């Protein structure tokens, strides 16, 4: 999706380090005291054309470098460095001087009168990854000022000063397969400023190449539709009539296609709120309210129409019943 599948090629280089005399801590430039013999044999099929081996031996600001030819997949070099702890790395170059393979820097101690065998595993050279985040069609394109780029457990942060500056970065990564995602943020990297959780995907980085990722936030269409609904008018001609079983309440039906029923409310005291008499809409335009033996001396009734969406309409004028 984003690039070629990687080719895995492991090169084992044997570096022979010899120390024969004593030397003090060097000053810059280095004093040639200690011989270092570097020997290597490359054995791999289908590898790119390697023409030079670049050997780097360093400690802080002190660096010894040597570039030697690779002939028939073999190379050798001799350097003069003082006794002490040094960091050794090797890069294999093609005819244009581009590093095709490289080793991770490895610490080694050169001591007086001892020989040491150091084995380095060379891997394909780092891939240059250019990342551009396209938010032009993003709903929060002006608010997205920060991004976190995840390659497995490594996190790289991008910050731009304003919405007109591109969200982009360039990083160096070893070739291989990575789990990759990007998260966008607003004015900080706090969780509350994150615009989205990000989506994990797998990408493959081939050796010795420039890799370009143009990424856009993952979005899905949201379709919004609606209709205008007005409150239903109140039922008219509410009447109450005493019955042996209780109070019969009737009213005129509301002539509207959205009416599904009615809610009837009763109030036993003006100090209390109206109480709903039925939890579901009453379909008929009448209701028999049965009373307890110890019922209040006066009850106020109101009725309201209920729409298909459950919206309760206006209350009717209050009607009082007295025994």
Image (cartoon, rainbow, N blue to C red):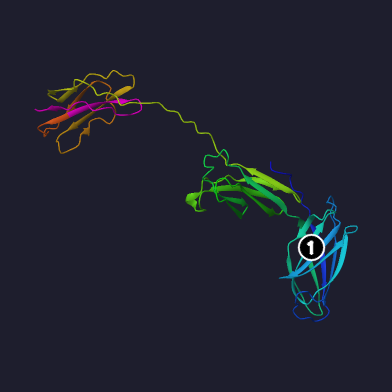
Classed neighbour count for the residue bearing mark 1: other residues with Cα under 10 Å, few (<14), some (14–19), many (≥20)? many
Residue 315 in percent (x, y) is at 23, 28
Q: Residue at x 15, y 30 (%)?
A: 300
Q: Is residue 319 magenta?
A: yes
Residue 93 in percent (x, y) is at 82, 57
Which of the image's four quarters has the C terminus? top left
Q: Which residue is mark 1?
A: 90
Up-down relation of residue 217 to residue 232 (above or below): below
Which of the image's four quarters has the N terminus? top right
Q: Is residue 154 left or right of residue 175?
A: left
Up-down relation of residue 184 to residue 296 (above or below): below
Q: How many marks?
A: 1
Q: Is residue 185 magenta?
A: no
Q: Is residue 320 left or right of residue 75?
A: left
Span of residues in magenta: 301-323
Q: Residue at x 22, y 26 (%)?
A: 303
Q: Residue at x 22, y 18 (%)?
A: 252
| Along the viewing direction, whichever of 210 and 41 lies nearer the viewer | 210
């Amino acid at each position: 999706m984003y690039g070629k599948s990687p080719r895995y090629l492991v090169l084992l280089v044997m570096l022979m380090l010899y120390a024969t005399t004593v030397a003090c801590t060097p000053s810059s430039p280095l004093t040639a005291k200690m011989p270092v013999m570097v020997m290597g044999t490359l054995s791999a099929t289908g590898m790119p054309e390697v023409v030079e081996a670049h050997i780097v031996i360093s400690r802080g600001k002190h660096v010894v470098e040597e570039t030697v030819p690779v002939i028939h997949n073999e190379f050798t070099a001799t350097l003069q460095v003082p006794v002490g702890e040094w960091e050794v790395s090797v890069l294999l170059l093609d005819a244009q001087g581009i590093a095709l393979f490289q080793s991770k820097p490895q610490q080694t101690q050169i001591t007086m009168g001892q020989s040491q065998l150091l084995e380095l595993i060379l891997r394909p050279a780092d891939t240059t990854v250019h990342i551009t985040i396209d938010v032009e069609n993003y709903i929060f394109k002006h608010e997205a000022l920060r991004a976190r780029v995840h390659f497995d457990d490594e996190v790289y942060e991008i910050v731009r000063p304003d919405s007109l500056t591109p969200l982009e970065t360039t990083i160096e990564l070893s070739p291989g397969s990575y789990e990759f995602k990007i998260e966008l943020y607003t004015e900080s990297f706090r969780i509350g400023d994150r615009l989205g959780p990000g989506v994990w995907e797998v990408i493959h980085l081939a050796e010795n190449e420039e890799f370009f990722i143009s990424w856009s936030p993952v979005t899905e269409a949201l379709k919004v539709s609606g209709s205008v609904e007005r409150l239903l008018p109140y039922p008219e001609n509410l009447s109450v009539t005493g019955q042996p079983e209780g109070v019969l309440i009737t009213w005129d039906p509301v002539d509207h296609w959205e009416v599904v029923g009615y809610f009837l409310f009763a109030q036993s005291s003006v100090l209390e709120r109206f109480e709903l008499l039925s939890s579901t809409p009453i379909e008929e335009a009448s209701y028999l309210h049965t009373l307890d033996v110890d019922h209040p001396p006066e009850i106020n009734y109101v009725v309201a129409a209920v729409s298909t969406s459950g919206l309760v309409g206006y209350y009717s004028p209050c009607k009082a019943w007295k025994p």
